[in-house]
Image (cartoon, rainbow, N blue to C red):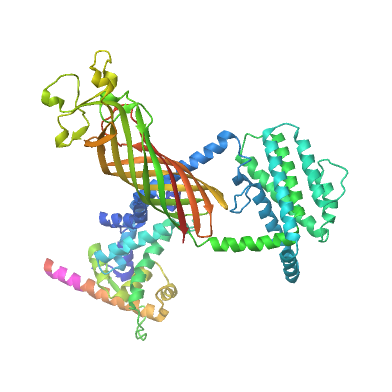
Amino acid sequence: MSLEQLIINCKKNDAKAQSQIYKLFSGKLFSLCLKYSKNYAEAQDNLQDSFVTIFKKIDQFSHKGSLEGWMKRITINTALQRYRSVGVFDLVNEDQIEDVAVEIDDEDISLDFLLGIIQELPDRYRLVFNLYVLDDYSHQEIADMLDISTGTSKSNLSRARVILKEKIEHYKMQDHSQSL
Amino acid sequence: MNDKKHIDRLFQEKFKNFEATPDDAVWENIHNALHKDKRKRRVIPLWWFAAGVAAMLVLLLTVGNIFNSGEGFNNPENNVVGTENTEGASETTRTIVIDDTKNNSSDSDPSNIMANTEQSENTGDNSENDIQKKKANDHDKTANQIANENPGSSTTNPSNSQDEVDLTKNNKSPVSNIKEETVAKNTPNLSDLNQKATEPDNVRNKALLETKKDQAQIAKVTDQNNSKELETLKENKDNIALIKEQESIEEAIAKANSTNEEEKEEQPNRWNITPNVAPVYFNSLGKGSTISSQFVNNSKSGEVNMSYGINGSYAINDKIKIRAGINKVALGYSTDGVIAFKDINSFNGGSGGKELDNINFTSQRKADAYMSTSNINSDSAPQFMVSNVNGALEQQFGYIEVPLEVEYSLIDSKFGLNVIGGFSTLFLNGNEVYTVLNNERSLLGEANNINSTSYSANFGLGFNYNISHTLKLNLEPMFKYQINTFTNTSGDFRPYFIGVYTGFSFKF
């Protein structure tokens, strides 16, 4: 069955079509959820909420962009919603060095480790880092989405980078010392 | 040492093709969230389902009747144009006029209308108009009847022309030409009215439009009618249009006001409560016996007993009511031509007396034996058997009846007519068998083959008379075919009972 047909059937709340769409996209969307969440359980909650929203609003999907892009936006929004209500985006001191060149050695680091340190980031850093670095949103877009200033967005990103670099280097040192 | 690299690149490359598989439980939860509404809807109370079935039965019956008899034209429902009145062609006429006058009144000066209304109330115009209207309705009915009696024939002209003659008499205007060109004839008629010539013209045009719509509906409903029938209908409708013009506009406004008030008053009263009493007659459709196989061919006579109870009903809309209730009903019948041998078993006599399979005897009657006179050859039998001890077995049983029925209203005016269909659940609460010998009745025992719970399919007609807005007198002949009443019968015993339920119903 074509994706078009699946969408049509999903609009009729057809369980089979919904199951197919879920199978096609749950992997990608779950990876998205994992990045934006503190932990695995929260990511699963986000994924669940996202798919429920997707299937309930699929009749609003207008085929202007790809279905995947539309679903990703819903998933990211769902993830952000969780923190919007908590109110983590307090104004922070914006007098921060912007966009420092944070460079590290290109070594083989496991994905699990990288995901782990992203999840360990404070909520506001994690969201900005994900949006800017991994999902190609501009600072202006991020500022609009999170209801913060672009300056806050930039400084949050810088702090996130610094924290991540430290963790990677710490990890490498440990790794290095163990291998010695 | 490897090349230095921007940290963003590292993450971007690593996460480029990152996919992860969530637990299966996630999908379960999503599925449940999306489809829980459906599951809820599936848990429909049993009685709703039953009521639906009953409603379908009633609908099928009524629709079937209309189409089978080919009298779809006469059925008032077909004539109704977007209104809830069903009093037949006369009613249609009235509603159309009301619509028109509403339009008119919105165009004209309100004070004018008020004056007109008062005038119609105070002067004798009203009664005159009423008489006119009644006559007009009569014409309409006869015209309709004739049209239906002579489908496809060209003999409708006389009837129409006759109507027109009558109409012109009512109007007291000289009309020489009596042909079907009603539109041409309207002008002299209209000139009699007090209104300006243009206003009635509007009325006529609108009315004609309405009736044409009407015809279109009728044409859709019945495929059977040929074009000639349609023509005759058209003529009838033209007559209706004529009649409408004869009703003065003042009267129509007065009527519109009154009908509006009536509608407003009737709406909130959806609940009815009806205590009822009924004589019920029990019998079987086939030849058989519930007592013993030897009595299959004996003559049986149904008894008339009483049923009483209370019903509550809820009006879903103007046409359909759902009702339920609780009745106590007693039923019985007697098997004639039975011979009883008192204490025959104690004598150990073998003269052919049989025990009765389906009866549990009371202790003191265990020794008796019974047989049907049809098994006795009167020549060989002792004289006393044939002459003296010819008796009957009387079976009595009673139920608590819980009916669940749907009422569909065919006529709803001062006198109402409903079709009723549904079913009852019957809970056994009385079960006795008596012997009747020489007018002496004594308890024999109880039947062991009557189910404690059984059902009946109910059909009937309801006639009612509105005494006031809240009080109605009902008369409902009902036929109730019993299902699953006996477990073990001989022959073809298909029990039913007929009751004529009467009672007052209170609206609230």
Viewer-proximal residue, B34 or B433? Answer: B433
Vertical position of residue B392 compared to residue A157: above or below = above
Viewer-proximal residue, B75 or A168? Answer: B75
Q: Locate residue A120: give its quadrant.
A: bottom left
Residue at left 76%, top 32%? B155
Q: Total number of numbered labels?
A: 0
Residue at left 27%, top 13%? B379
* Residue A101 in view, yes or no: no
- Main structural element of the magenta stretch: helix, strand or loop? helix
Split into 4 quadrants, where in the image is the N terminus of chain B? Answer: bottom left
Vertical position of residue B140 compared to residue A52: above or below = above
- Residue B435 pos. (x, y %): 25, 33
Vertical position of residue B303 compared to residue B8: above or below = above
Q: Is residue B94 left or right of residue B405?
A: right
* Residue A77 in view, yes or no: yes
- Residue A1 pos. (x, y %): 41, 44
Q: Locate residue B142: give its quadrant.
A: top right
- Residue A110 pos. (x, y %): 23, 63
Residue closest to the far top: B379
Residue at left 78%, top 36%? B158
Residue A176 is inside the magenta segment: yes
Which residue range is magenta in the image? Answer: A170-177
- Residue B221 pos. (x, y %): 60, 41
Residue B249 is inside the magenta segment: no
